[in-house]
């Protein structure tokens, strides 16, 4: 009788959840020093402030008992800041001189911005690492012109009907061209899922607008007897603020959480996929609390708000490996070492603010 030897069944790999270990008190000390030195140096220190901020958030972001790191050069970031300042100054001055000159400068900025953005992506990813292994970005300049110039123009001429499609293509450009070591990321979210998120958020906002319109109509027709003259204007202003607050509570948290979940649930790397479970209710609690406390403290709660938001984003994310994650990382480290990495000199500018 023939016997068949069955291979042992491998237990499913557990998910690896992201976590953030930073605290508001720690980041407040970094934030206040960055703020003071940026003011004293008339903005020059902002490049060093960005590096200190990113290093704090990267190094406190953990996955599978290891943290990320950021290696960007402040000088490279300062170059980007100078370019951004020159472009903005030219735009402002041209607007004061003549409409034709303003249009020429606007076209110039639009013509070079996709190239600068592609360069900035390469800089940002190359200077990000996990377990000593750098990320990379291979998006072409031609692709950048398509998603950052061509599609936005088409979106404008279609009365923003292409906005969800454009958003999807931008994220696809970013994720499909990113790699970790030699392993490429992939993006499988669909344009239809983006359209559904946009449409539902628009319907929510439209419903709130209708409620505000009905209230404004009642006030204008004097249906509320005790409101007259300036009180009607006050009631309208309060209604507008109510709309803004309701949007923060309902529309914005839904849209942000839905889009983040779509993006990361549709992202994978080397067969390993990501998971995002953010909820609109949880995000609304964070956003509203941060907004109120930042106003009450005259802005000094801002670093605590940044930490709360980062922690919430990350605690709702996980990596679902198809095999042993340590073996995957080791394999990528070996391949990257054999293939060599690009020289950092090529990535010498970051226009991100």
Image: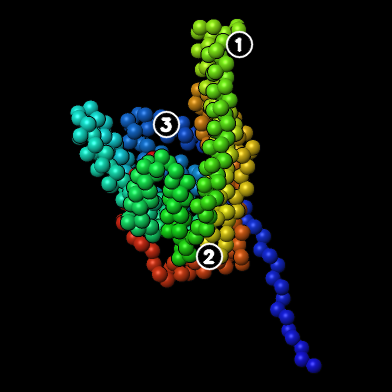
Q: For residue 352, say whether it is visible.
A: no
Mark 3 vs mark 2: give the one in front.
2
Q: Which mark is residue 35?
A: 3
Res. 142 image quadrant: bottom left
Residues under labels 1 and 2: Cα distance?
Answer: 63 Å
Q: Is residue 283 left or right of residue 150?
A: right
Q: Earlier in the sequence, mark 3 or mark 1?
A: 3
Q: For residue 303, say whether it is visible.
A: yes
Mark 3 vs mark 1: give the one in front.
1
Q: Is residue 185 left or right of residue 223?
A: left
Disc 2 target residue: 270
Q: Closer to the camera, 134 or 258?
A: 258
| Quadrant (top left/top right/bottom left/bottom right) for the C terminus | top left
Task: Please tell me which residue is depicted at 43% across the width and 58% down the height of the picture.
Answer: 177
Task: Please tell me which residue is depicted at 80% across the width and 93% down the height of the picture.
Answer: 1
> What residue occupies the far front of the structure in this picture?
221
List x then y, in percent, for residue 179.
45, 60
Element at badge 3? helix
Tags 3 and 1 in contact by the CB under 8 Å rule? no
Q: Earlier in the sequence, mark 1 or mark 2?
A: 1
Residues under labels 3 and 2: Cα distance?
Answer: 41 Å
Mark 1 residue crowding within 10 angstroms, few (<14) / some (14–19) / many (20+): few
Task: Please tell me which residue is depicted at 56% across the width and 27% down the height of the picture.
Answer: 210
Tags 3 and 2 in contact by the CB under 8 Å rule? no
List x then y, in percent, for residue 12.
68, 65
Element at badge 2? loop
Disc 1 target residue: 224
Q: Is residue 219 above or below residue 346?
A: above
Colour theme: rainbow
List x then y, in percent, for residue 134.
45, 58
Mark 3 residue crowding within 10 angstroms, few (<14) / some (14–19) / many (20+): some
Residues under labels 3 and 1: Cα distance?
Answer: 49 Å
């Amino acid at each position: 009788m023939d016997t068949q030897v069955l291979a042992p069944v491998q237990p499913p790999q557990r998910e690896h959840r992201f976590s953030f270990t930073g605290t508001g008190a720690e980041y407040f000390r970094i934030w206040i020093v960055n703020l003071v030195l940026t003011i004293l140096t008339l903005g020059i220190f902002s490049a060093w402030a960005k590096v200190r901020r990113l290093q704090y958030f990267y190094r406190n972001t953990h996955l599978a008992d290891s943290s990320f790191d950021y290696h960007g050069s402040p000088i490279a970031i300062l170059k980007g800041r100078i370019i951004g300042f020159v472009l903005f100054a030219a735009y402002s001055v041209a607007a004061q001189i003549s409409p034709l000159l303003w249009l020429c400068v606007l076209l110039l900025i639009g013509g070079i911005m996709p190239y600068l953005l592609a360069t900035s992506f390469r800089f940002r990813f190359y200077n990000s690492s996990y377990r000593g292994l750098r990320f990379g970005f291979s998006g072409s300049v031609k692709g950048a012109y398509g998603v950052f110039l061509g599609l936005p123009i088409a979106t404008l001429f279609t009365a923003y009907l292409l906005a969800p499609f454009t958003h999807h293509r931008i994220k696809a450009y970013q994720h499909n061209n990113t790699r970790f070591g030699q392993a490429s990321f992939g993006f499988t979210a669909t344009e239809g899922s983006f359209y559904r998120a946009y449409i539902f958020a628009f319907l929510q906002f439209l419903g709130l607008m209708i409620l505000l319109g009905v209230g404004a109509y009642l006030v204008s027709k004097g249906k509320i007897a005790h409101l007259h003259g300036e009180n009607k204007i006050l009631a309208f202003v309060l209604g507008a603020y109510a709309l803004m607050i309701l949007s923060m509570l309902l529309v914005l948290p839904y849209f942000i959480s839905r889009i983040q979940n779509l993006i990361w649930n549709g992202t994978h790397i080397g067969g390993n996929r990501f998971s995002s479970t953010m909820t609109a209710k949880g995000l609304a609690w964070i956003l509203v609390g941060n907004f109120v406390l930042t106003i009450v403290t005259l802005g000094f709660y801002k670093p605590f708000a940044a930490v709360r938001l980062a922690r919430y984003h990350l605690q709702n994310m996980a990596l679902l490996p198809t095999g042993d994650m340590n073996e995957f990382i080791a394999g990528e480290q070996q391949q990257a070492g054999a293939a060599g990495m690009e020289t950092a000199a090529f990535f010498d500018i970051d226009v991100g603010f």
